[in-house]
Amino acid sequence: MPIPEEVTGDELDKDVKQELQSLPKTLAEDVARNLVMVARLIDEDPEGAYGYSRVALRLASRVAAVREAAGFAAYANQKYSEALAEFRAARRMTGNVELWPVMADCERGMGRPEKALDMAGAPDVQKLDKAGQVEMRLVAAGARRDMGQLDAAIVTLQSPELASSAVHPWTARLRYAYADALLEAGRESEAREWFAKAVESDRDGSTDASDRLAELDGVEFVDALDEDAADEGEQALGSVTGVPVAAEDTEDAEERDERRTEGDHEERDQDDDVADDFGLEEHEGHEDDEIDEDDADHADREDVDRKKSGDDDQV
């Protein structure tokens, strides 16, 4: 896979570069550059990161840092079985327990929350640093939710780390998880409070707590790009007529014309229906008018004859 020329491999942490010293220099440089690409892409392009991790794994499968990077790349692509295998390999090589929480989360991803809970209660958890223990607590709470034990998940998250006002790299995620569990339990007011606290501690935007808080407050966000497109359409229409015209006005005018046309059709249909009810045709009405005029003329002549007859009688 292509690697930009500016990527040298020196960007790696010194501990990882030290591990790669067991390899020939040229090979170590190739592996290092692929590991840098994994780190660069894993958040924005997980599939690309996975591809580079496979290259590094093919070149140096006996380096723990490579197995760990391959595990995280697989994890980012929800390849949990593959990720777990790589994490186990890295742990065997180093003996470190820091991967224990993510290994437990892989068990969750594979549909085995009970196994994740067993790992949460293992002695290895006591060997984790504070960040690792908080991570393990998050995984255990997630496993409880997977099993439908929502109240137990909420209790699992209640801890001194949650109650502390100090802000650590994991604080926002812990508060967010607690707020999310409360919301699912129907405790909306408490959930809003903890989403707000998550926002306060989320300095690097690692959660969408601000969006969740706005959603609870009924705030709707409008895409600025959509607004710009609508404005451009209105300006284009105004340039033709010389007067700015809103899209809604155009639609209203069309609806009014359509209603008028429908109304005319309905009036004609109603007239036809009335005529049909009485068994009449339109041309029959005109013939009746002609007959009425003939009768009127005949009646007038009879009146004149009777008047003349009456005058003769008087004489």
Image: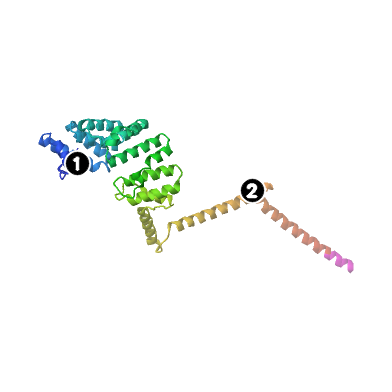
Quadrant in the rendering for residue 5? top left
67 or 266: nearer the eye?
Answer: 67
- Between 110 and 203, which is closer to the camera in this rendering? 203
Earlier residue among tags 1 and 2: 1
What is the image's colouring?
Answer: rainbow
- What numbered label is drawn on residue 273? 2
Residue 102 appears in the picture as rendered: no
Extreme residue in the left direction = 25
Badge 2 density bin: few <14, some 14–19, many ≥20, Cα 10 Å: few
Q: Position of residue 8 (x, y in %)?
A: 14, 43
| Element on which disc 2 rests | helix
**Which residue lies most toward the bottom here?**
315
Q: Position of residue 239 (x, y in %)?
A: 37, 61
**Residue 36 tag number:** 1
Against 223, residue 96 (above or below) is: above
Which residue is at a point 83% across and 63% down the rendered structure image? 306
- Taking depth in this image into account, of 158 and 275 the one nearest to the observer is 158
Name the quadrant containing residue 234: bottom left
Does residue 296 appear in the picture of this structure? Answer: yes
Q: Is residue 229 above or below residue 180?
A: below
Residue at 43 percent of width and 42 percent of height: 184
Disc number lying in front (1 or 2)? 1
Residue 9 picture quarter: top left
Residue type beneath disc 1: Val
Question: In screen coordinates, is 47 left or right of 252?
Answer: left
Residue range (magenta): 307-315
Q: Main secondary structure of the magenta part?
A: helix
